Amino acid sequence: MKTPEIPANEVERQKALREYEILDTIEDPEYDSYTKLAAEICNTPVSCISFIDENRQWFKSHHGLDINETSRDVAFCAHAINEPYEVFYVKEASKNPDFMDNPLVKDGIKIDSYLGVPLTTPDGYALGTLCVIDFKPLNLSEEKISALKLLAQQLVKLLELRKKNLILEKKHQEKIEEVNHLAYTLAHDIRTPLTNIEQIIQILLNEHSFQLDADGIKCVNFLSKISNNLNTFVSEILEFYVNKPEQSELSTFNLRELLNEIIDSIDFDKKAKLIIDEIPETITSSKIAKHQIFLNLIQNAIKFNFKDSPEVHISCHEDEAYYFFDVSDNGNGIDKADIEKVFTVFKSSKKRDRFGKKGNGIGLANVKKLVEFLGGQIYIKSSSEEGTTFSFSIKKAIAAKS
């Protein structure tokens, strides 16, 4: 039996293969459509998409075959990758001295005919093949071989798209990690001045309240409440980013109280109207994650609402596994050009809010991340007539951690 040669650029080829992160991935209908089409074009019982790593031939898709991998030493595809731009065609393996004693010919699959088109990257690395197999002699016309080549070229384009998406995802994750680090740093650095503010407020109330009228005392008391809430929130953020969202402590808390706390902290002049429908009184989840989700959504609903009386409407329904929340406003809606990027970190609308400030593109990106960490998904529905609704799901926690 002829053993496959190792390509001269094997180290670089293996590195290139790893960059696609395709090995040992789950079955994918999109790849299965290629093998099905290849078998139909060539009228063969078997077709495969194979990738050759250090020791094996692994099949991303296999039509008419029940195995997922073979040893590289016996793989026909391992021969094919040595000529990245040529098809590898064995018409009668059972009579070919190089293959007649191959285990895949003698036993197992009982291959008699094989044609493999290398899946060659733009850099010239043959990662594997798109191949067709028959159990009898096979004579393929040039037209069919050309069609298989075109199919292999399209498959390489699919792989290139996968690689580009992986790069984009990694860059996006790096941005998210930068934001997390920034959030932790800001929370850590803001703690001391917040404590100082609380102390000054107490001095004002204890030693100078006689100099203030009723409205002045009301304002100072409001500041005291806000600074207390902020201090608690900052402490929770610090703990949250130390432990990571997926490891954050679960607790059972009153959701209505949390929502009222949030609206009180951001709507001093009481111009906004918060409407809370029937919602679960208590839920078990990460309180700090929920706080950040609702804080960002409610804050955005008010900030980017240019009506005299902004309204925020919160509703919820549930099933056995999930809570489903809607956070709606009566605002002006989100421009179609901005909807696709609202969850992308550092991407924000050019519009300024009702206070003349421009967004930084961090808040909603973090909301999406937190929702996903809590096992859910988030969607947007928006129009200039009906305002904007953020709909998101949260997976139910079975019980609070002890």
Image (cartoon, helix red, strand yellow):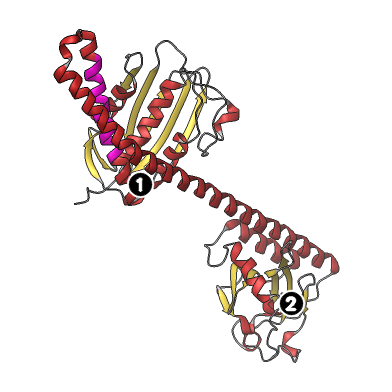
Which region shows up in magenta?
219-235
Observer able to see residue 211: yes
Q: Based on the picture, tell me whether residue 222 belongs to the magenta stretch.
A: yes
Q: Give, as a three-letter code, the residue at label 2.
A: Asn
Q: Quadrant of the N terminus?
A: bottom right
Residue 63 in picture, x, y percent from top left:
62, 67
Tell me which secondary structure the magenta stretch mostly adopts: helix
Q: Secondary structure at mark 2?
A: loop
User: In which quadrant of the rendered view does residue 51 lie?
Assistant: bottom right
Residue marked by disc 1: 241
Please tell me how many numbered marks the rendered image carries.
2
Q: Residue at x 51, y 49 (%)?
A: 174
Q: Earlier in the sequence, mark 1 or mark 2?
A: 2
User: In which quadrant of the rendered view does residue 200 lie?
Assistant: top left
Q: Residue at x 62, y 60 (%)?
A: 31
Residue marked by disc 2: 82
Please tell me whether residue 364 is drawn above or below residue 153 in the rendered image: above
Observer able to see residue 256: no
Q: Based on the picture, tell me whether residue 164 belongs to the magenta stretch.
A: no
Q: Residue at x 22, y 23 (%)?
A: 201
Q: Residues within 10 Å of mark 1 (few under 14, many from 20)?
A: some
Going by the image, does 350 lie left or right of 40?
left
User: In which quadrant of the rendered view does residue 367 lie?
Assistant: top left
